[in-house]
Amino acid sequence: MSSASVSLPSWLGRAIVEGALIVFAVVLGFVVNEWREDVADRHAARQAMARVAAEIQGNIDQLEAVVAYHESATGRIDERIAEIESAELPVQGVIFDEFPRILPRGVNAPGLTRFAWDHAQEHGRLDVLPYEIVAETARLYDMQEAGVESTWRQIVELLFAGPSVMEPHDLVPSLRFTRIGFTELAAQERFLIGQYQRLLEKLEAAGLAAPADEG
């Protein structure tokens, strides 16, 4: 019995080609969708970090507006302590009455914000950005909260610690505590300014300090 070559039906060949084209189209569709999602994620992250950069610049401006005043408060406190200690008789007084002299412009809180950063963490898809930049930004915002803002709250609690601020007593201990607080606050403000400025330079170098092109 002689062997004969068996040819495939023409429709089967077309079906195989068409099936392969369909599979290719589906795979290509997945690849394109992933690419589009990646582009969208990076765009959202860049927009979020641009808002964070603007917020950081605003925080720097706020710090620079008050740090010299807080530094000068320590000098005025030193002058007042020197006056009291040079007096021939013990000096009793109400610490609240000293505030207009040592803080002539009021307490001047450094009005720092973190809304843009919190929003970026929740909605900015920051996982597509370099880890080092995201980690450093988080570290500095934590430093802002645990450093400057925490010290500021402690100073306010010290200055306005209930009815005792209206009672006459030895002023020097209270003034020394107040001086320590403002010395620490001003040092933290100076340090945070420098750290934020360096972070802005890194964001600018990475192209993250300006809004992404909407087009």
Image (tube, rainbow, N blue to C red):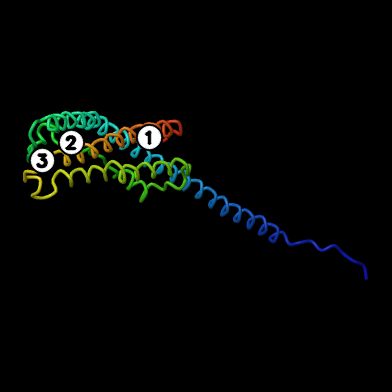
- Rendering coords of residue 191 (x, y %): 34, 34
Q: Name which residue type carries label 3.
A: Ile
Residue at image mark 3: 95
Name the residue nearer the viewer: 91 or 20. Answer: 91
Which residue sits furthest front? 88
Q: Is residue 194 above or below residue 94?
A: above
Q: Indicate left or right for 48 with 158 as reference.
A: right
Report helix, strand or loop for mark 2.
loop
Q: Secondary structure at mark 1?
A: helix
From mark 1 to mark 3, how far is it between C-alphas? 35 Å
Which of discs 1 and 3 lies nearer the camera? The answer is 3
Vertical relation: 139 (above or below) 108: below
Other residues around mark 1 within 10 Å, as few (<14) / some (14–19) / many (≥20): some
For residue 104, which quarter of the picture?
Answer: top left
Quarter of the figure with the N terminus: bottom right
Residue 51 in which image quadrant? top left
**Who's the residue at 36% across and 37% down the image?**
50
Q: Amino acid at mark 1?
A: Gln
Reading the image, the residue beneath label 1 is 195
In-image side of 113 versus 91 (left or right): right
Residue topped by disc 2? 108
Indicate the position of residue 23 as horizontal and vertical percent values: 60, 56
Give the residue type at disc 2. Asn
Q: Which of the numbered marks, if any, corresponds to residue 128?
A: none
Classify residue 111 as left or right of residue 103.
right
The crowd level at tag 2 (other Cα within 10 Å; few <14, some 14-19, many 20+) is some
